[in-house]
Image (cartoon, rainbow, N blue to C red):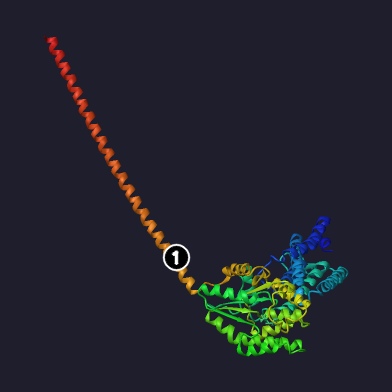
Amino acid sequence: LTAAEHRAGPIGYGLLVLAATGAPALGARLTRATLPSLSRRRLLALALLTQGVALILAGLVLDFVLVLLLTVLAGLAAGIVVSAGRTLLAQEVEEARLPKVTEHLFAVLRAVVAAALVAVPLIAAAYGDVEYGTVEPGSFTFIHGGAALAVATSGLLTLVLAAVVLLRTDDRRGTAPFVRDLVDSVRGSSGPVPHRGAGTGFFIALEGGDGAGKSTQAQALAEWIRGKGHEVVLTREPGGSPVGQRLRGLVLDVGNTGLSHRAEALIYAADRAEHVENVIRPALARGAVVITDRYMDSSIAYQGAGRDLAATEVARISRWATGGLLPDLTVVLDVDPTRARERFTEALDRLESEPTEFHQRVRAGFLALAAADPARYLVVDGSQAPGFVTTAIRHRLDRELPLSEQEKAARAEQERLAKEEAERRAAEEARKKAEAEAAERKRQELLAQLRAEQAEKERLAEEEAERAAAEARRKAEEEARR
Ligand code: TYD
């Protein structure tokens, strides 16, 4: 109908169909590469927003080429919506149920598309052709076909959906304003980190299943970062504070059978609140590098994905408990739980004793979190030798860790030396040039002198020859007289 309203003919119709079907497929493929440092929840809202605005404009503009371009834009955004939505879904749902839930979702999606194919033409028909104003040049006129208005209406509905998604799922509200986050991710920076003020520290969280090797890596990293001249605070959850120690005993004691899942989640959150308030924030405020063995993601993975609690709710509790403090970098050490189990040496605690399926779900939970916010995560294969794992993490930190005072001083010293060296070289060069010029001048002088001497000699020889010739003439005259 849109093609017909614009009198675009069969080619226009074909192009419109191509845009509406090809662009979503392309968008889905481009999702990973789109603003990688923006949280996937925010990307979802942004894509919906783009789609809504593009559809509204596509309904209102009168130029068919513009309609075509806007359809491509809306299509790309729609592809991103589906693909980002799927990533986020994986985070909310247990791994075992994921295929079923995805299938269900796509069935719903198909039904919605089918319903839209029937409903939208009806809406278009209900609008009919709308005309306001006169057609005189310069005066306001509003002439639109029903199809265009139906498209604009669907754009409006999409905008409403975008607002709902943003309000319901935004994971960083209050910690990083949406627009600033967006501007930063467009510029390609890793985005503002909530605790960051000028000159404050760096926050690293190590996450992963039991037996992934987090403690070993935490130690190795702490040593390496200390070597760079930073103050390093190495801490852990549960039990990073004195009260936390007691909570740790409570929650890990195998004797506490039947502890309710909600209580378990709240104890971990209480431990975290204490930890952030009394250990992590003060250390960051001093400018220290904080490495914590487990943080918020452990709760989302263990209590959310592992237990039967909703991951979003568990995340919300943690966000509240920490005042929204997120790590600058979260490293997930990924290992297959059955292999990790072989590493256990001590008696198993309450969570370690959970069955393998539980730990499989936990693993999937961590990976889904990392996939949803790739810029803030590093996933490392934890089954490799510890040395390799450390190198992989260092590699990433080399790019992200701020310079310590010691490194700054060393760098300044290096720059000073380089500058001195450059100055010395320049002086040397100037000296050599002056010398060369002097030598050249001397050579020219010598040459001039030689030339003068030569000329003098020639002059003398000429005089001599003239004198000889005069003499010969004189002799010849004398002879003739005689
Ligand atoms: P951990 O420090 O890894 O214990 P260990 O001394 O064995 O290295 O963590 C203890 C357990 O607590 C671990 O099985 C994971 C679990 N846990 C949660 O379930 N939720 C959480 O929020 C945290 C921090 C840990």
Depth order, front residue of 281/173: 281
Name the residue at the left extreme: 482
Quadrant of the rendered structure where residue 83 is?
bottom right
Q: Amino acid at mark 1?
A: Glu
**Disc 1: which residue:** 415
- Please give the name of the residue rendered at 17% of the width and 17% of the height, measured from the top-left corner: 472
Quadrant of the rendered structure where residue 392 is?
bottom right
Left or right for 318, reference 403 = right
Name the spot of residue 360 as percent of width and height, x first.
76, 75
Q: Cβ of disc 1 within 8 Å of ligand 1?
A: no
Dot 1, how many residues are within 10 Å of its Cα: few (below 14), some (14-19), or many (20+)? few
Name the spot of residue 215 as percent of width and height, x first.
63, 77
Name the spot of residue 415 as percent of width and height, x first.
45, 65
Depth order, front residue of 199/111: 199
Quadrant of the rendered structure where residue 114 is?
bottom right
As drawn, 302 above or below 476: below
